[in-house]
């Protein structure tokens, strides 16, 4: 463990100073594209300004024979595209134990490290993985003369990573956030979901039998599907919050079921996540909707702030008690609404209307 005094010292001579805060940028959606797919790559410039985060994926989902083409494609995009001030440019590197990670990072950082905001590291198991990436990035940044550190985002997708989630979040000032990787995590835990994220109809609770029903246990009994990811997301949110970094829900594999996708994203939003992955343009719309505060909630939050005056004590609003603690929740929501409105004109208009009305 480094001493507190050393924590913000660059890990290589000439590397940029580590960041003390994660820069505030819209982070509602991380849209994945495969840079080895020419059709997808060609669409990237058109998505700039419309998507919070564009991520060139080099890891799972890219066939082994396309790994080099994906890296080359990403280099081309990084050199050619101006991402502006709204859209962040990320990549998901191959796993640390794969034959591609070292070449990925040594090719990308010198060439387009000034463009890359964040590198996502899959299958992180413990702080030691982050320490390795941290030092390597510092050396490459120093060599390339970069003036801004590249941040690191870890995917929470192994049982050991889950057990070590707090130390992973605290491992480096480079840590920007975590994403839940439900597909790999399910495999690592021996869960039997056989799908990418979302719920499962078999994971449920059942109403007690009606004593008056002669059919007994075979009678009509309501069942309620439960959220397989509740514990994991809640623990991830705590680990991120205590370390000042950002939690995200990961992939939702059933692309056509935008309704269940919205539910899963909203559970994550309500539990404290700032965004989710999108694997298809339809999911961009869902994520932007869910992770932007609802204008009706903004109206309510403004009312609470106004009614609470100096912020102490309690008031009754619409028959409900509001106090210092619910005021703080409202302030979190309004701060997010203000941040998004400052960068997204459509939201600025939606929230301005609520101020007027
Ligand atoms: C994402 O990478 C996952 O495994 O769910
Ligand atoms: Mg995975």
Image: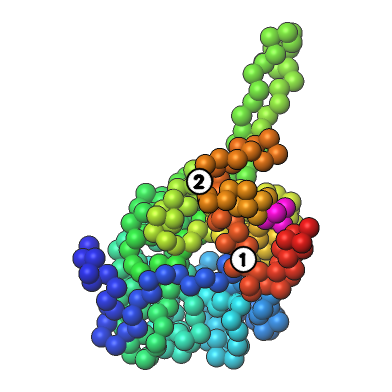
The mark found on residue 312 in the picture is 2
Is label 2 within 8 A of ligand 1 (CB to nearest ligand atom)? no
Side (left or right) of 116 relative to 143: right
Residue found 34% across the figure and 60% down from its top: 170
**Magenta stretch contains residue 297:** yes
* Callout in the foreground (2, 1): 2
* Along the viewing direction, whichever of 146 and 327 lies nearer the viewer: 327
Name the quadrant containing residue 70. Answer: bottom right
Horizontal and vertical percent for residue 125?
37, 58
Residue found 34% across the figure and 67% down from its top: 172
**Magenta stretch contains residue 316:** no
* Along the viewing direction, whichever of 85 and 281 lies nearer the viewer: 85
What segment carries the magenta color? 294-299
User: How many numbered discs?
Assistant: 2
Task: Say if residue 1 shows up in the picture.
Answer: yes
Is label 1 within 8 A of ligand 1 (CB to nearest ligand atom)? no
Residue found 55% across the figure and 91% down from its top: 79
Judging by the rendered image, the residue that carries numbered circle 1 is 338
Name the quadrant containing residue 141. Answer: bottom left
Vertically, is 134 above or below 200?
below
Q: CA distance from mark 2 to mark 1?
A: 23 Å
The mark found on residue 15 in the picture is none
Side (left or right) of 328 relative to 81: left
| Residue projecting furthest to the front | 310
Sequence-wise, the earlier of marks 2 and 1 is 2
């Amino acid at each position: 463990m480094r001493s507190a005094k050393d924590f913000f010292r660059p890990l290589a001579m000439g590397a940029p100073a580590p960041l003390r805060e994660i820069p505030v940028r819209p982070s509602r959606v991380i849209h994945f594209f495969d840079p080895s797919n020419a059709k997808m790559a060609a669409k990237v410039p058109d998505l700039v300004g419309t998507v919070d985060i564009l991520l060139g994926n080099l890891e799972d989902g890219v066939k082994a024979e396309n790994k080099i083409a994906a890296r080359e494609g990403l280099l081309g995009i990084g050199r050619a595209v101006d991402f502006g001030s709204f859209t962040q440019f990320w990549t998901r590197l191959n796993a640390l134990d794969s034959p591609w990670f070292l070449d990925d990072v040594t090719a990308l950082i010198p060439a387009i490290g000034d463009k890359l905001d964040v590198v996502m590291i899959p299958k992180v198991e413990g702080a030691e993985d982050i320490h390795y990436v941290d030092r390597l990035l510092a050396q490459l940044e120093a060599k390339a003369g970069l003036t801004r550190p590249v941040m690191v985002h870890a995917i929470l997708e192994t049982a050991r990573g889950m057990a070590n989630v707090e130390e992973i979040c605290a491992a480096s000032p480079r840590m920007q956030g975590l994403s839940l990787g439900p597909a790999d995590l399910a495999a690592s835990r021996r869960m039997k979901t056989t799908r990418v994220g979302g719920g499962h109809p078999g994971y449920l609770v059942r109403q007690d039998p009606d004593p008056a029903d002669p059919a007994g246990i075979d009678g009509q009994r309501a069942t309620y599907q439960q959220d397989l990811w509740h514990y994991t997301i809640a623990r991830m949110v705590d680990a991120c919050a205590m370390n000042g970094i950002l939690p995200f829900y990961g992939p939702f594999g059933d692309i056509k079921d935008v309704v269940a996708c919205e539910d899963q994203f909203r559970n994550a939003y309500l539990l404290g996540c700032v965004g989710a992955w999108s694997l298809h343009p339809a999911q961009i719309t869902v994520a932007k909707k869910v992770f932007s505060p609802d204008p009706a909630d903004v109206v309510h939050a403004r009312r609470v702030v106004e009614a609470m005056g100096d912020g102490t004590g309690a008031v009754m609003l619409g028959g409900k008690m509001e106090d210092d603690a619910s005021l703080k929740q409202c302030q979190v929501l309004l701060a997010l609404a203000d941040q998004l409105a400052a960068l997204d004109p459509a939201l600025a208009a939606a929230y301005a209307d609520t101020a007027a009305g």
